[in-house]
Amino acid sequence: MKKTVLCYGDSLTWGYNAEGPARHAYEDRWPSVLQVELGDSALVIAEGLNGRTTAFDDHLADFNRNGATALPVVLATHAPLDLVIIMLGANDMKPFTCGRAIGAKQGMQRLVDIISGMAYPLDAPAPDVLLVAPPALCDTENSDFAAMFEGGVAEAQKLAGLYARLADEVGCGFFDAGSVAVTTSLDGVHLDAENTRHIGSALAPVVRLMLAL
């Protein structure tokens, strides 16, 4: 039976292109690349939203960017699910939402708790979870982004280690996207087309292993 994979993330999953600003072509977004890699064995659903945090409110936004409050609706919408891939935490580095890597780790813990503890439609079982640390922020000469993420470059370096430890604690899968992709210095946050494709390709063997494909 075909497996169903939900990719829950922010602008890195949505496919924000700092060169425009624009949106990467559909085929360049990492969930799309993952779908091609998995072929007919799985259906990959992309749920990326610009500005989404793990579990923090952004009171400057005109829509809900809190990943914890939006997640139950998304899970119920797409159930039954076999795997949820979560790549969040970059927007937690904004000092007016959180600004600390430990806060992002605790936010990811909250998301895992929601996934494992939710009552799914038709009594479907809870899906497996793959935690993905986003590529770390980098320095940029873009003054607006530098100010929005002030102090975030150093904190973002801690995310992979914290997420790996969390994955061990809760029994989830883990992947460090920073091992295959780097952020662009155009804004210090987002990915060019090549790097976002790299994430989709690198996740494919991890997903195959977790889903026994």
Image (cartoon, helix red, strand yellow):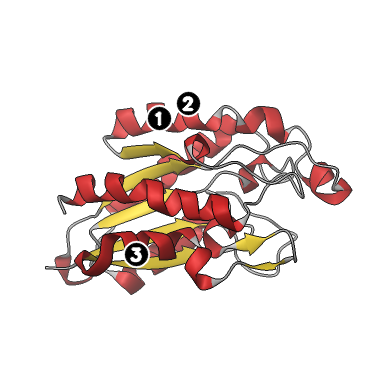
Residue at far front of view: 194
Q: Is residue 146 above or below residue 126?
A: above
Task: State the SS at label 1.
Answer: helix
Instruction: Confirm whether residue 66 shows in the render.
Output: no
Taking the image as shown, residue 144 lies to the left or right of residue 213, namely: right
Q: Position of residue 39 (x, y in %)?
A: 26, 66
Q: Which residue is mark 3?
A: 35
Taking the image as shown, residue 36 lies to the left or right of residue 39, namely: right
Q: Position of residue 199 (x, y in %)?
A: 46, 49
- Amino acid under label 1? Ala
Task: State the SS at label 3.
Answer: helix
Q: Residues within 10 Å of mark 1 (few under 14, many from 20)?
A: some
- Amino acid under label 2? Gly
Q: Position of residue 52 (x, y in %)?
A: 58, 57
* Residues under numbered marks 1 and 2 in contact, where contact means CB atoms less than 8 Å apart: yes
77 and 179: which is toward the camera: 179
Q: Which residue is mark 2?
A: 161
Task: State the SS at label 2.
Answer: helix
